[in-house]
Amino acid sequence: MAEATPGGPSPIRVLLADDHPVVREGLSAMLESAEGITVVGQAGSGEEAVVQAVALRPDITLLDLRMGGMDGVEATGQILRQVPDCKVVIVTTYEDDSDILRAVEAGAAGYLLKGSSRQELIDAVQTAARGETVLTPSLAGKLFRTRAPEPSPLSGREREVLRLVGRGLTNAEIGAELFVSEATVKTHLLRSFKKLGVSDRTAAVMKAMEHGLLN
């Protein structure tokens, strides 16, 4: 397992939950190969994931969407009620829009496909640990295409910023992309939050997608 270097940051502590042991072991091996990430536990069901999350207090829980008994959406809600500092990322083979929205509405920090590469998985954990949105680009594009457009309360620049958030970019990366300061990016995000009636990046992106504001 990865360990913090003396005087360095603590490793990101991850709990894995999937009802297939082979999948759990594969995810664990990929994450343990990355510096600064350690897998602290594994769970084979939603119920077990909740119990382990409360006991282990991980930074990130990677949670399968569809398991026997309690599904990933219900487990997400229970974990976040009992371990509010934990970030939950749904990892699944399914791309159904309603499932994405259900997971995010339950408080998930994002949604990642099981076919993602090792680097995408590691990036997702690091992104979620920073409190930012995790969303596989193909899923973002799918939502952009399928949501019917409505009159947008967002400015053009606010929509640009949220599109880049949906791609997983940090505030600094968005600033570089748009040639503005990081402080300006934060200002656009805060204005978006107020207009959309949300309080965080993930909810802002998902609500804007749901209403077709990012097409």
Image (cartoon, rainbow, N blue to C red):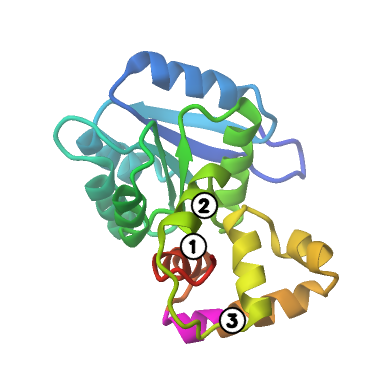
> Residue at coordinates 27% horizontally, 55% vertically from top-left?
77
Residue 210 position by quadrant:
bottom left
Q: Amino acid at mark 2?
A: Ala
Q: Nearer the viewer, residue 99 or 153?
A: 153
Upstream in sequence: badge 3 or badge 1: 3
Q: Nearer the viewer, residue 186 or 215?
A: 215
Measured along the vertical axis of the image, is residue 183 above or below residue 22?
A: below
Residue at the disc numbered 2: 140
> Residue 190 bears which disc, if any?
3
Q: Is residue 2 visible?
A: no
Q: Is residue 13 visible?
A: yes
Identify the image quadrant of the C terminus: bottom right
Residue at the disc numbered 1: 202
> Residue at coordinates 44% horizontally, 17% vertically from top-left?
25
> Residue at coordinates 38% horizontally, 31% vertically from top-left?
93
Measured along the vertical axis of the image, is residue 74 above or below residue 44?
A: below
Q: Amino acid at mark 1?
A: Thr
Label 1–label 2 contact, CB within 8 A: no
- Image location (x, y in percent) of residue 37: 61, 34
Numbered disc in front, either 3 or 2: 2
Q: Relative to residue 82, is residue 207 drawn left or right? A: right
Q: Let me know if residue 114 is in the magenta part.
A: no
Residue 101 position by quadrant:
bottom left
Residue 157 position by quadrant:
bottom right
Q: Circle 3 — which element?
A: helix
Q: Nearer the viewer, residue 50 or 24?
A: 24
Q: Circle 2 — which element?
A: helix
Upstream in sequence: badge 3 or badge 2: 2
